[in-house]
Image (spheres, grey):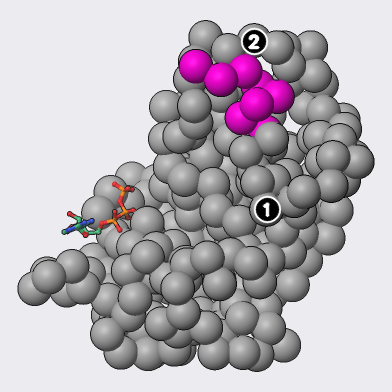
Amino acid sequence: MAQIEVRGLFAAYDKADVLHDISLDVKPGKITCLLGSNGAGKSTLIRAILGLTPPHTGKILLDGHDITGLPTHKIVSRGIAAIPEGRKMFPKLTVTENLRLGAFQVADNKVIRERMDTVFEAFPRLAERRDQLAGTMSGGEQAMVSIGRGLMGAPKILLIDEPSLGLSPLYVKENFRIIEGIREQGITVFLVEQNVRQTLAIADYGYVLSGGKLVGEGTAAALSSDSAVHAAYFG
Ligand SMILES: Nc1ncnc2c1ncn2[C@@H]1O[C@H](COP(=O)(O)OP(=O)(O)OP(=O)(O)O)[C@@H](O)[C@H]1O
């Protein structure tokens, strides 16, 4: 069974229709990607899953339970964490303080310390810079803080919105390697991206969104050799 099932979803902002009849599955322990160019509706789908932009038609199931229309805090408390586009963080707080905020619902300091140790193991650079103000870190390091903060909630599912945005190729490579490591920990990943080549190199399965509609899907290997995907994204 898929961990997230989206069925016949339509979503709109006021009168502007954005998503049309979206159905997709996010399988447990896999990296599922959603590829699409600017304005395709990728972030809107993440918002719909999180209950921030509830769909006007269609359903979203989490582990077989209907979560459509639930408030965001209830959805998040069922084990979904989201890493927003643009590495939103608190620039005047240290790395440790930013990470701590990712576990705000946890009262036990021992649990918090253990989770932080796990994050520092995954990101040795954050361990070295744990007392640095996050706003003074490089873009790639801020991306690590952002992913690390998501992991502090010990999610079952991580929704990641365009982690490669604005990063140098070296940092993109490093962050994508980290996302592969997240899958190795058994965490389900839904990765929304424009960077087709790098995304398909780590994903298991993918969907292609264009103008708010799904125009393709398949295994990462199949999508890599799909002529329509190539025409749309590789030029
Ligand atoms: N709050 C909003 N109110 C009205 N329209 C919106 C709002 N947010 C997004 N849109 C519109 O919805 C469409 C899809 O936007 P969305 O952010 O989901 O696309 P995206 O694929 O994530 O794009 P990008 O890669 O540029 O972030 C766009 O036409 C955008 O202008």
- Looking at the figure, which quarter contains the C terminus? top left
- Crowding at label 2, few (<14), some or many (≥20) Cα neighbours within 10 Å? some
Residue 96 located within the stretch drawn in magenta: yes
* Residue 190 placement (x, y as % from top left): 59, 61
Residue 20 in view: yes
Q: Is the residue 194 above or below the residue 3 in the image?
A: above
Residue nearest the observer in this picture, 63 or 229: 63
Residue nearest the observer in this picture, 161 or 167: 161
Badge number at residue 132: 2
- Crowding at label 1, few (<14), some or many (≥20) Cα neighbours within 10 Å? few
In which quarter of the view is residue 40 placed? bottom left
Q: Residue at x 8, y 73 (%)?
A: 15
Query: Which mark is in front, 2 or 1?
Result: 1
* Residue 95 placement (x, y as % from top left): 65, 22
- Ligand 1 quadrant in view: bottom left
Q: Residue at x 66, y 71 (%)?
A: 78
Residue 51 located within the stretch drawn in magenta: no
Q: Residue at x 64, y 10 (%)?
A: 132
In which quarter of the view is residue 76 placed? bottom right
Give the residue pinned by disc 1: 105
Three-letter code for the amino acid on which mark 2 is drawn: Gln
Q: SS at mark 1?
A: loop
Residue nearest the observer in this picture, 205 or 111: 111
Quote the CA–CA distance across marks 2 and 1.
Answer: 24 Å
